Amino acid sequence: MPLHIPPAPAPALRSILTALSSATAVRDAPTASLRAHQGPLSPDHPLPVHVWDDISQAGPPRTRLAGWRFLVRGGERALATAEARLTADGWTFSRFCDGPYVVATERALQQAESLAAPYQPRLLSVPELYMLTLWLHHDITADGADGMPAPGDLLVPLAPAPPGIAPHLPQRLADLLPRLARRLAPTPLLREPA
């Protein structure tokens, strides 16, 4: 089933296009792949980035929108990501990034395309675990900027994933949540014998 990618806010997209068309912004980017690329660059697959602030709390997960992330394509391949953040003055370009999450995001999106059910893709960051997942939301008509993970949604942990969490394995939120909670549980201190 095809993914139903939510449209990014027009000002967020404009901020990314402006950054990509700026020779200075690309030349000064901390991403070697962008600096080395010859030819046009284009934003692709805009995904809302939600942050799961306190995974250890009881009750349903609460998230907040942190920005929009675009894959940056040079030809046929993703070279980096570009992020737009909402500020007091509106949407603005935030940064270019490269690293393993670029390839992992592209791979997870390809995996999701082959699933039987339609989904709306989003990114869900779990800062407490230094973890990023592709969040496949079941409501394809929802506003990508709103909403909370639902029990039937799928999460695809991106590589590198925390120890004990299999990367690129789509899992229902209800199945993954207990493993995440265990990863966050405090480790009891060992006492020395008296």
Image (cartoon, rainbow, N blue to C red):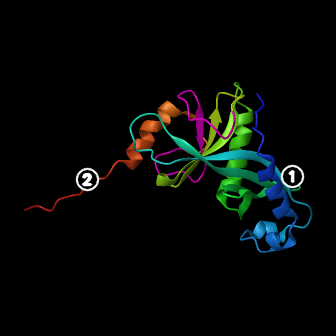
Label 2 amino acid? Pro
Label 1 amino acid? Glu
Q: Which mark is residue 5?
A: none
The magenta segment is: 143-166
Determine which quarter of the picture holds residue 119.
top right
Determine which quarter of the picture holds residue 91.
bottom right
Magenta-colored segment: predominant secondary structure:
loop
Whichever of callouts 2 and 1 sits on the residue coming sooner in the sequence is 1
34 sits to left or right of 188: right
The quadrant in which the C terminus is found is bottom left
Q: Position of residue 162 (x, y in %)?
A: 50, 52
**Residue holding disc 2:** 188
Residue farthest to the left, as pictured: 194
Q: Is residue 192 above or below residue 168?
A: below
For the residues marked 2 and 1, what is the alpha-carbon distance in whole angstroms? 49 Å
Residue farthest to the front, as pictured: 89
At x 78% / y 31%, what residue is drawn?
2
Label 1 CA crowd tier, 10 Å (few <14, some 14–19, many 20+): few
Q: Position of residue 164 (x, y in %)?
A: 46, 46
Whether residue 61 is visible here, answered yes or no, is yes
**Residue holding disc 1:** 76
The quadrant in which the N terminus is found is top right
